[in-house]
Image (cartoon, coloured by chain):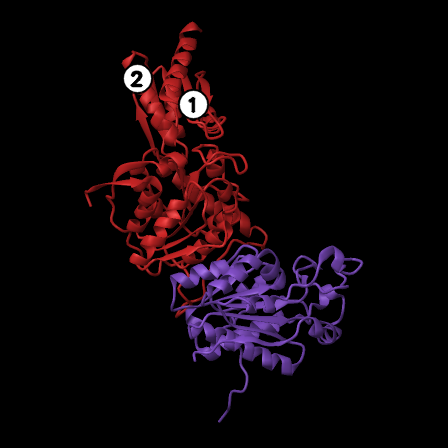
Amino acid sequence: MGEKVLMKGNEALAEAAIRAGCRFYAGYPITPQSEVSEYMSRRMPQVHGVFIPAESEIAAINMVLGAAGTGALAMTSSSSCAISLKQETLSYMISQEVPCLIANVSRGGPGLGSISPSQGDYFQATRTGANGDVRLLVFGPSTIQEMVDLVHDAFVLGQKYRTPVTILSDGMIGQMAEPVEFKHNAIELEHDKGWNLTGAKNRKPRRLSSIHLKEGELEQHVLHLFEKFEKIRADEVRYEALYLEDAELVVMAFGSCARITKTAIKEARREGYKVGLIRPITLWPFPAKIVNQVSKRCKKFLCIEMNMGQMYEDIKMDIESDARLDFYGRPGGAIPTPEEILERIKQSMRELTSV
Amino acid sequence: MTKLVFKQPESIKPDYNFNFCPGCDHGVAVRLVAEVLDDLGVREKTLMAASVGCSVFGYDYFNVDVVESPHGRAPAVATGMKRANHDHVVFTYQGDGDAASIGFTELIHSAVRGERITVICINNTNFGMTGGQAGPTTIPGQKTTTTPYGKDIHEIGFPVKIAEMVALCEGAAYVARGAMDSPAAIRNAKKLVRRAFEVQIEDLGFGFVELLSACPTNWHRDPIESHHWVKKVLYPVFPQGVLKNITAE
């Protein structure tokens, strides 16, 4: 504790999970997240945990369902096209209210795409490909330290709300190394939480179920899930804000792209531009309120993403004024430079004054 | 002095209400598994991974903790349950469509890893729950709703020999195939089911039993005729016996 160590993002993610008390990991290799599995294969035996190199992405998340259903802190990790394969079981777990951590170290898409960092999976993460009425708590860390802290919080919130949580990292955060500090202690878990499967001894059997065939039963179940999701929406929004007090232009970016954007914004401020930043940390629930508020006093928003405009749609929905929304995106694994973003900021500012 | 000669197993819920079709052998198989759990005295520490298909109703009948699995994934779910709970007894109850078609990968890899779980697979040569479509075990010439002219092996291929394929896996400790078409077959089936649980409890490896079952509704035969059909037609295609039995010695 209190000591900084230089670690690769993927390995720091895995170590943070172990420190949080995760003792079950199942995964399948895919670039750029394979180091998570490799690290777990070394560390889990040291802490008497379980590491399973699963036969498929689908098997991996189903193993997690089994372990987490008995009450274990469990996780899997993968990337983009392979996260797609996990959507069916994700839907089951949301409905069955079985918590777990799913780390998505995303890569370029669509299809097999590329192994470069990309944010093309914002929709996949925040909307999910899970069938039915679902919501998924999604964190989008922009530094390794933040990711390490969020891993702990993801397990805590997963248990609190009995729901899966995703950390959306990417090939940049996953593959780079930064000094990190593991600040959190292991989460204390009750053996019997009242819902987990421990064996029907001196009590009625429990069933983790997603099927509700009787008329009206499924509607009640979904309404119950949404009470929970509304509570998450009300209580768990996180974002970082910079220079909003006098900002005429508010730039929005998340994850790795926000790191680069921040550098550009600091330079723009030095040059006298009244530019601010809102960086969503929870991608769902989206920080809608701050966008609402700020839209009433700023003149314009600029959304910067490493995709063709996905978070863009969330911002668009939350602007409650005539403030315009500009967009700059680089898809397919391309990474914008700070200079490129600075130039785009200046362009948005020029258009502001020329109107 | 009265002597108890017959009772409902503890491992079947007291308020159960079977909704299998008349003449279906699922009810028999559920009872056999429940009797074995009672006989081994493990009900209170048994966890079940339910499946999809007619076997799905297992969670309404077994008096144990249950997690529902997506179609075919029960062996993976059971793997997770068992690895996180070594002291528990973990089993899946699946049909041939679930285990040998969409979930064949999970079944085979669980066997290869030698997971200490037990898989009970009911083979009735079709997808029963969805109305009798051709499944992985549908036999050559068999008529189903998706093989209306009879299963053509040149078009659709051969039936999967589930038990034989599982027996090839080195992690499998016990592999057997039985049937439930006669009292003698049922008595034998119970022995197979019991051993498939024992190898798990004795930490020897993966336990697997395939049970040939009648599906009168989808076979369009009455229950008696269906059971004759099991014996006459299915027996030669799916030979019964213990294919593998590793003991502690």
Residue A93 rendering spot, x and y as whole percentages? 47, 50
Query: Which color has been applied to chain A in this rendered view?
Result: red
Residue B114 rendering spot, x and y as whole percentages? 46, 66
Circle 2 chain: A
Q: Earlier in the sequence, mark 2 or mark 1?
A: 2
Q: Nearer the viewer, residue A17 or A314?
A: A17
Query: Which color has been applied to chain B in this rendered view?
Result: purple
Q: Amino acid at mark 1?
A: Cys
Q: Nearer the viewer, residue A171 or A246?
A: A171
Q: Mark 2 and mark 1: span between their CA atoms?
A: 18 Å
| Residue A267: mark | 2
Tell which tag, 2 or 1, sits nearer the viewer. 2
Q: Which residue is mark 1?
A: A303
How would you rate the neighbour count of disc 2 (Cα within 10 Å): few for under 14, some for 14-19, many for 20 or more?
A: some
Q: Residue furthest right?
A: B149
Res. B9 visible in picture: no
Q: Quadrant of the C terminus of chain A?
A: top left
